[in-house]
Amino acid sequence: MIRPTTVQDTPHLLKLTDETGVFKPHEIEALNEVLSDYHAGTKEHGHVAVTFEDNGHILGYAYYAPAAMTDRTWYLYWIAVKRDIHAKGIGGKLLRHAEADIRKHDGRVLFIETSSLPHYELTRKFYLKHGYEITGVLRDYYSDGDDMVVFRKRIA
């Protein structure tokens, strides 16, 4: 079941994110800050955090929000699934849930940013599989040799 993320989920989401082996320590620290801000009030500004739970076990989550100063543009900031259950459809369910929710809020377009590093190859394939297009690459964005790959999908 996909449900709103609670403050009690935060330690589980941080652990899940760390155990994917994809995110850097400072990214996990950033997630902790994002979730703290979310529970302190950013959800009042349209931010959304949802958790995928099955039989009391947290298996994944997504975090998305409208982009400031745009006409109905949204960003998917985080999406992660437990490493040992990748490619079982949970990420797709979370992504489709986010897209449907954004449509309900009259969203127009959804952007996603990710890394160009080799260990993000499956992530990039995941977005392409779900109808996203690469709309830009910012060379050396995260660090030398680590480009930002920007994906886009029309939601409306």
Image (cartoon, rainbow, N blue to C red):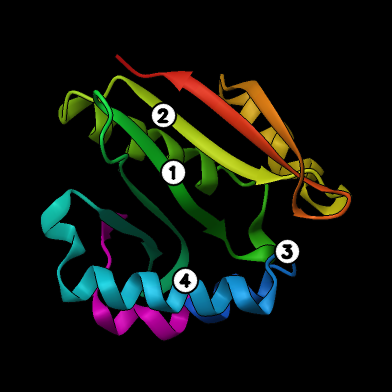
Instruction: Locate the N terminus and report the quarter of the image it occupies.
Output: bottom left
Q: Earlier in the sequence, mark 4 or mark 1?
A: 4
Question: Which numbered tag is attached to residue 31?
Answer: 4
Q: Nearer the viewer, mark 2 or mark 3?
A: 2
Question: Which numbered tag is attached to residue 110?
Answer: 2
Decide which of 3, 149 is in the foreground and name it.
149
Q: Are marks 2 and 1 in contact (CB under 8 Å)?
A: yes
Question: Which numbered tag is attached to residue 76?
Answer: 1
Q: CA distance from mark 2 to mark 3?
A: 22 Å
Decide which of 156, 74 is in the foreground and name it.
74
Q: Amino acid at mark 2?
A: Leu
Q: Rate crowding at label 2 as few (under 14), some (14 to 19) or many (20 or more) other CA atoms within 10 Å.
A: many
Instruction: Locate the C terminus and report the quarter of the image it occupies.
Output: top left
Q: Rate crowding at label 4 as few (under 14), some (14 to 19) or many (20 or more) other CA atoms within 10 Å.
A: some
Q: What residue is disc 3 on? A: 22
- Measuring from the top left, give residue 3's x and y in whole percent: 25, 58
Q: Earlier in the sequence, mark 3 or mark 1?
A: 3
Q: Secondary structure at mark 2?
A: strand
Query: Which portion, as a residue range, is magenta?
Result: 1-13
Q: Residue at x 17, y 59 (%)?
A: 43
